Every structure is written in structure tokens, then in C-alpha cells.
Amino acid sequence: MASNGNSSTAHKPRGSFILFEGGDRCGKTTQSENLVKHLSSKGVDVALWKFPDRQTAIGQMINAYLQGKTETDDAAVHLLFSANRWEKRESMLAALSAGQTLVVDRYAYSGAAFTAAKGIPGLDLEWCKAPDKGLPAPDATIYLSMMPEAAAKRGGYGSERYEKEEMQRSVAQRFQDLRDATWHTLDAARSIEAVGSDVTRIAEAAIEACQEGKPLEHLWL
């Protein structure tokens, strides 16, 4: 669950945190990029963020792991992913406070879902959520739902460590266990345009709520 931020800022307009989550190759990149273009065309101050941020020192370690170039203990790599989000926290808070809307491709839900999906004793969902408690929470989470078999037919599938159908099915179940009040589940097997229409509706409602003073919440406190 998320908790309210400082009530003294509850009525101050701010940017909205719009998150895309889902399995690999479900269309998050396409939809997030299209949303940023649409919002920009409407005059919204908006930026696209992606996690992991592979440009930081921690992100480069994660990138090597995801590409299969290095091997790392599963608990350790989970904490690296979390650290990568924490190192961006202050920048995220500053952007939202300044009125910039952030469209984010993957976040802490992915971190928890992918590690818990491995089924390693001791690394259950609650353990996986713990390092990210207190991070800024999204105002709207758009979960793009797609069967792993369909995702596997998309270009580039299988190029990274977790792009295996059995793993993706397990990840999808963990995502369902993480659902909260911010979530909107969309059928990603539809056309790009049909999914995009729903995405725009959800995003614009979230932006309006934040302009009206919706307080920022924090993850899992």
C-alpha cells in the first residue's frame, strides 16, 4: 500500500507520475513514447524515464547482468535494481514538484515481480518489496497484459536474461499479487491505437488530479 505524503503540500499543483508495467515485449516502450509525444503536443511539461537507468554506474552493472555478461547473486542484483531507483529519487521528487509529469517505463513493481518469480527460498514477495518502501508512488500504473506466447512472437524477444516464457508466466502472476488502487490493466494484444486511446484517457485523468492537488504518496509504507 502507498501512504500519503506531506499533507501541507496536498493542494499544490504538481506533475503526475505515470507508470507502465508489464511483462517483456508487451509494448511498454511504444506506448510510453507515444504518450510522451501526445502530452508534449498538448503543451504538457513531460519527460520519459526508464528503469533500470543504465547510464549510471549502478545501471551499467545491471545492464551487464541483464545481457548475460556477468553473474551476480540474486539477492545482490535485486538490491542493485532498488539502489538504481533510489539514486534517482531526489531528481524524481524535484521534477514532480516543479510541475513536470514523468512517464516511467518499469519501476519497483517490476523489481519485486521478477525477483520473486525466480522462486528462490527467502526471496519472497515481501522481501522483494522491502528495499523500495518509501520511494515515490505512481499516480497511475498502466499494466499492459499479454500472454507470454504472444509476446514471444514480437521482435527482439529472448535477447535478455528473463525473456523466457516460463519465467514470464511466473512474473505475470507476481504482478497480479502486487496490484493496488493505482492500477489500470489493459489488454496489450489489441492494436497500438486502441491501447493508446485507453492510455491517454488514464494519463490525462491522473494529470488533472495532480493539478488539483492530489498529494504524492509513497510505496508500501
Image: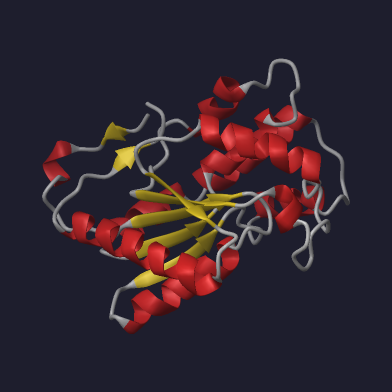
Q: Quadrant of the C terminus?
A: top left
For residue 58, above or below residue 109: below
Task: Look at 77% across and 46% down and name the residue there.
Answer: 162
Please give the count of numbered marks on the rendered protein.
Answer: 0
Residue 207 position, x and y percent, is 26, 61
For residue 109, above or below residue 50: above
139 relative to 164 in the view: left or right: left
Between 64 and 149, the one nearer to me in the picture? 149
44 relative to 208 in the view: left or right: right
Of all residues shown, which one is farthest toward the bottom? 41
Q: Kindly tell me whether residue 114 is visible in this rendering.
A: no
58 relative to 145 in the view: left or right: right
Q: How is the image coloured?
A: secondary structure
Residue 111 position, x and y percent, is 60, 39
Residue 103 position, x and y percent, is 43, 62
For residue 44, above or below residue 207: below
Of all residues shown, which one is farthest toward the front? 190
Task: Look at 55% across and 70% down and name the residue there.
Answer: 191
Between 198 and 46, the one nearer to me in the picture? 198
Q: Quadrant of the N terminus?
A: top left
Task: Look at 79% across and 39% down and name the residue there.
Answer: 166
Residue 27 position, x and y percent, is 60, 63
Between 22 and 62, the one nearer to me in the picture? 22
Task: Look at 59% across and 21% down and name the residue there.
Answer: 127
Of all residues shown, which one is farthest toward the top? 122
Q: Kindly tell me whether residue 220 is visible in this rendering.
A: yes
